[in-house]
Image (spheres, rainbow, N blue to C red):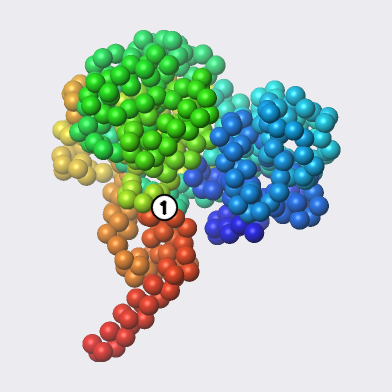
Amino acid sequence: MIDLRPYQEQIIADARNALMKHNSVLIQSPTGSGKTALTVHMMGTATRRGLRSVFIVHQNELLQQTSRALWQQKLEHGMIASGKGRSPQRAQVASVLTLVNRLGQYEPFDLIIIDEAHRSAAATYRLVLDAYPDAKVIGLTATPSRTDGKGLGDIFNTIVQGPTVASLIEAGYLCDYEILAPPQLADVSGVKTTAGDYNKKDQEEAVNRPTITGDAVQHYIKHASGKRCVVMCVTLKHAADVCAAYLAAGVPAEALEGSMTDAERDARLRRFEAGTTLVLVNVQLLIEGVDIPAIECVQWLRATKSLIVWLQGIGRGLRPAKGKDSLLIFDHVGNWKVHGLPDEDREWTLESAKKGKRASSDEPDISVQQCRKCWHVFRPGLDACPSCGAPIEKMKTREMEIIDGELAKVEEATERKNKRQEQGRAKTGIELYELAKRKQVNNPLGWAVNVLAGREGRKPLPADYDAIKKQIFEAKALAQVSI
C-alpha cells in the first residue's frame, strides 16, 4: 500500500465522502502535489474490493509514468495503448484515443479516473463517459478551468479542493520561487485571439525577434548560468531560433519536438537531467505530464491568456530536488500581470468564468505596485519599495518607462517573504523543529522532517525522525546542564 502524505489522505477522505452523494467528483490539487500517488491508492483500493478501474491519460509519458508507479506497488494492471493487446486485469491504464477506438471490447468499469481533467470536455473523453454510464468518475487536475472560459460542471457534480501551492511550499513539498520580469515586454497587444489564446502565427511575429531572444539569453547567462532551464516558445520556428541563439552564446541547448520518437525525446530529457544539456526549448510539450524535478529555471517567451498554461508550465519546476533551493522564473512577456503569482490563493469552481475575468481579458486585472526607481514589483499596501526604500506611487502598467537590460523582481509581500527567509535560514532539523513550534504547526517533528527531505528531493525516512529526536534530546540535556 502506497504511503500517503497527510493532505493526500484528506483528499482521499473528502473524495470518498463526495462519491457517496455524487457520481462524478473533480479533485483539484497543485502540480507536484502527488496526483500519481492518489491514483495508485484509488486503483489499488478498487482492485482489492473486486472493482474494475481505468486511469485515462492523453500522453504516452503519463501512461508509462503511471504504469511504473503501479508496478512499484505490485499492482497488476493492463495497458490500453497502441501496440498492446487486451489483458484481463481489473486495473487498466489507458490512452484516451486507444480506449475510444476499443470501446465495447472491455467489461464495464466501476471507476474511471481522468488525468489532466481540464481536458475532459473534449469529445474523446465524452465518448468514454457515455460508454460507461454507471461508472463512478474522478477527475484529477491542478487547474480545473478551460481556455474558453467554460466550466466543467456538465461533467463533474462537485469539486474537492486540495492544498494550496503556498502551503505546499511552506511545508517543503514544493520548492520556493522568484520571478524576474523585464520592464520592456514583447508587445502582443495587437495579436488576435484564436480558440481562447493568442494566435500562434501572429504571436510568433511579435516575439520571435533577435532583440527579445538576445535579451532572454543574456538574462539567463547573468542570473541563471549553469542552471537547467526550460524555455516556453510559441512555434517550432521560434523554438529553433531560440535554441540557435543559446548555442551561439555557448550554452548547451536542445529542442523538444512532438515529431520525435520516444527514444529521441527520452535521450534529450536524460541529458537535461544529467546537466549535459542546460536549456530545453519546447512548444507546449513541457506544459503538462512531465515530471522533471531537475528543472531549476522556467523561461517564458510565450504570452498566454490561459491560466492553465501559466500554472501548469511553472508547476514543472516547483518539485524539490537535491541542491535546488528555489525555482527561478523569467517572464519576458508579462504573463504574471494577467494571471498573478503561482501561489496566489485561488477559489476553483465548476462554473463558467464570468465575462471580464482576468483569464479572458487583454488588460492586467491584478492590483500591483511597481517601484519607478528599481522596477521592483510587489503587492499593494506598502508606502516604500521593499527593495530600495524609495517612496511608492501607484501607476498603471502603460505608464511604465522602458529600461533595457534590467530585470524587475516580482515577489511576495514583505510578511510572506520574511517567513520564507526564516525557513530558509533554518538549516538543521532542530532549527526547523523549533521554527515549527513557533509557527504552531500541528506536528512540528513531521513538518521538520518533510522540509529536510524535500530539500534533498526525496521522501522522509525513519532515520530522519530519529536524528531530529536525538538533536532535541541533546539540546534539552544541554539546557539542563546550563541551568
Residue corresponding to mark 1: 457
Crowd class of label 1 (few under 14; some 14 to 19; many from 20; radius 10 Å):
many
Say left or right for 9 vs 245.
right
- Tell which of 12 and 146 is nearer to you: 12
Residue occupying image coordinates x 28% and y 54%: 421
Q: Is residue 238 above or below residue 275?
A: above
Q: Residue at x 80, y 42 (%)?
A: 88
Query: Residue 379, position in %: x, y?
Result: 32, 40
Image quadrant for the C terminus?
A: bottom left
Along the viewing direction, whichever of 10 and 373 lies nearer the viewer:
10
Find residue 254 and report its image quarter.
top left
Which percent across, then down, holds residue 11?
61, 52
Whether residue 23 is visible: no
Q: Is residue 396 left or right of residue 3?
A: left
Residue 131 percent location from the top left of the image:
81, 30
Going by the numbered disc 1, the residue's amino acid type is Gly
Residue 466, above or below 161 = below
Compared across the picture, whether 465 is left or right of 289 comes to left
Residue drawn at x 57%, y 28% is 146
Q: Which is nearer the eye, 237 or 349?
A: 237
Q: Against 23, is 279 above or below?
A: above
Residue drawn at (36%, 47%) of the image? 176
Q: Horizontally, is 212 left or right of 17 in the view?
A: left
* SS at mark 1 in the image: loop
* Frontmost residue, 479 versus 263: 263
The mark total stands at 1
Image location (x, y in percent) of residue 424: 30, 56
Residue 115: name its quadrant: top right
Q: Name which quarter of the figure residue 451 lies in.
A: bottom left
